[in-house]
């Protein structure tokens, strides 16, 4: 959890929350995700918006912790 928080802070993430079996990452106002950089994550079920990412953590094939860390490192 500490590693994810540190990566999130470095990436400009304002909040990480859960809602309807999804982890939601929201950016600080005025910052946008680079959709091109994150496009490969769409293949594992990540929904990519300008200011938020949504990752379903209930999908059996989804190793959400690893995916979350990889997204934050980009």
Image: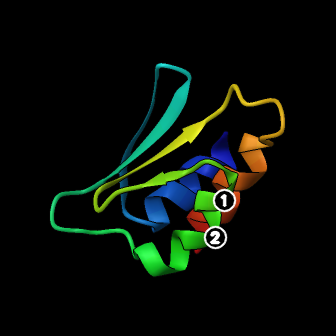
- Badge 2 marks a residue whose secondary structure is helix
Task: Give residue 65's position: percent from left, percent from top.
Answer: 74, 44
Residue behind mark 2: 40
Task: Give residue 35's position: percent from left, percent from top.
Answer: 42, 73
Q: Are marks 2 and 1 in contact (CB under 8 Å)?
A: yes
Left or right: 56 as drawn, with respect to 8:
right
User: Could you say which quadrant of the image residue 6 lies in?
Assistant: bottom right
Task: Give residue 25's position: percent from left, percent from top.
Answer: 43, 46
Disc 2 to disc 1, how far (Cα)?
Answer: 6 Å
- Badge 1 marks a residue whose secondary structure is helix
Left or right: 40 as drawn, with respect to 49:
right
Of residues 43 and 3, the one drawn nearer to the viewer in this rendering:
43
Q: Residues within 10 Å of mark 1 (few under 14, many from 20)?
A: few
User: Could you say which quadrant of the image residue 51 lies in?
Assistant: bottom left
> Looking at the picture, does residue 12 appear above or below residue 66?
below
The residue under the point 72% across, 42% down is 64
The residue under the point 47% across, 80% down is 36
Furthest toward the top, the residue is 20
Question: What sort of colour scheme is used for the picture?
Answer: rainbow
Left or right: 62 as drawn, with respect to 46:
right
Of residues 22 and 72, the one drawn nearer to the viewer in this rendering:
22
> Looking at the picture, does residue 36 appear above or below residue 44?
below
Residue behind mark 1: 43
- Picture mark count: 2
The residue under the point 66% across, 59% down is 43
């Amino acid at each position: 959890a500490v590693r994810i928080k540190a990566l999130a802070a470095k990436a400009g993430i304002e909040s990480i929350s859960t809602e309807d079996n999804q982890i939601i990452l929201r950016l600080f106002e005025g910052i946008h995700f680079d959709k091109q950089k994150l496009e490969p994550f769409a293949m594992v079920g990540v929904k990519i918006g300008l200011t938020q990412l949504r990752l379903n953590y209930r999908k059996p094939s989804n190793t959400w912790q690893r995916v979350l860390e990889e997204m934050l490192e980009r």
